[in-house]
Image (cartoon, rainbow, N blue to C red):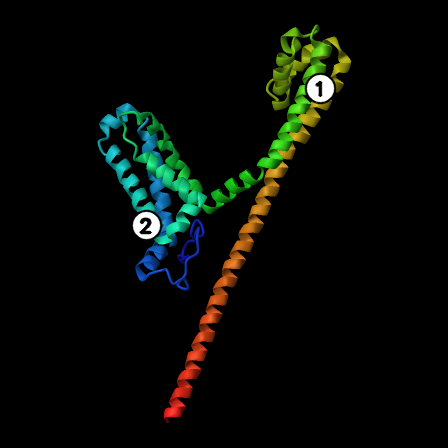
Amino acid sequence: MSRSPTSSPPHSPRHSFTARSPTVTPSRARVLALVESSRFQWFIIAVIVVNAAVLGLETSPQLVREAGWLAPLGWVTVAVFVVEIGLRIFAHRGAFFRDGWSLFDLFVVAVALIPASGAFGVLRVLRVLRVLRLLSAVRSMRRVVAALVATLPGMVSIGALLVMLVYVSGVVSTQLFSTTDPEHFGDLPTSLLSLFQVMTGDDWANVVRPVTDAHPASWVFFIAYILISTYIVLNLFIAVAVEALEMQNEDDKREIVDEVEESERLVLDAVTELRAEVAALREEISRRG
């Protein structure tokens, strides 16, 4: 990817195409250099931001009526997206359709072309997905999304642990406190809702106080529940997310190192071939001389 001397590109190229590939024609190479250039990428990000602002302004019918330029501006941004997708398909060919982020961009742009009226008019609400194109346009955002996806198995396990904790605590609290505070612990569903409220810290004192007033020793149960659910289990979610981000950063670093090593190898191969050609040329000149 080409880099501007004053700013770095928002993300690295999704696919690497270089002159070593015999299928890259000169015109395709020029388009590839364009779509992977930092200036083009920053331009697309700016268009995404403008389009997001237009979508927000279009939620006001009065503003739409008064600002006649709003709808044309929205269609101009959509036209830019269509041209961008076309250029990327031309440059990347089949690799474009093997990349998840590229397919996401294609889907978002296709939704923007759905007619406002007719059977599919209700799908126009999906236009707001165009704002999510920032996720694919900015590398740091893609890294966060990839990390979130990587955390799903761990999140499911921790979520199951949390559900079991709340369920067991709900059964115990219903058996112990249903007669004391039927409003909060009268049955199992009510107890589960009350314990969820305690776990999130939403006015938990008003849930706990009627029980602790009647049973002073009950604070042991609630303190243990709050410590385990809020300060241990919920923090495990954060720990898993942080670990996934660190692993994603390491993967990105390895990818950058691999790209640099590949570029160096190509340069060395080119230098070796050039030296061989120069040596052959010298030998040919010496024979003729």
- Residue 74 falls in which quadrant of the image? top left
* Neighbourhood count class around disc 2 (C-alpha, 10 Å): few under 14, some 14–19, many 20 upward: some
Give the secondary structure at mark 1: helix
Give the secondary structure at mark 2: helix
Dot 2 and dot 1 residues touching (CB under 8 Å)? no
Q: Is residue 260 left or right of residue 122?
A: right
Residue 22 percent location from the top left of the image: 38, 63
Question: Of residues 10 and 269, which is closer to you in this image?
Answer: 269
Picture disc at residue 178: none
- Residue 217 falls in which quadrant of the image? top right
- Residue 127 falls in which quadrant of the image? top left
Q: Which residue lies under the disc numbered 1?
A: 222
Picture disc at residue 87: 2
Above or below residue 181? Residue 34 is: below
Q: Is residue 2 left or right of residue 203?
A: left
Residue 24 percent location from the top left of the image: 36, 60
Residue 230 visible in the current orientation:
no
**Amino acid on which the number 1 mark rests in the picture:** Phe
Q: Quadrant of the C terminus?
A: bottom left
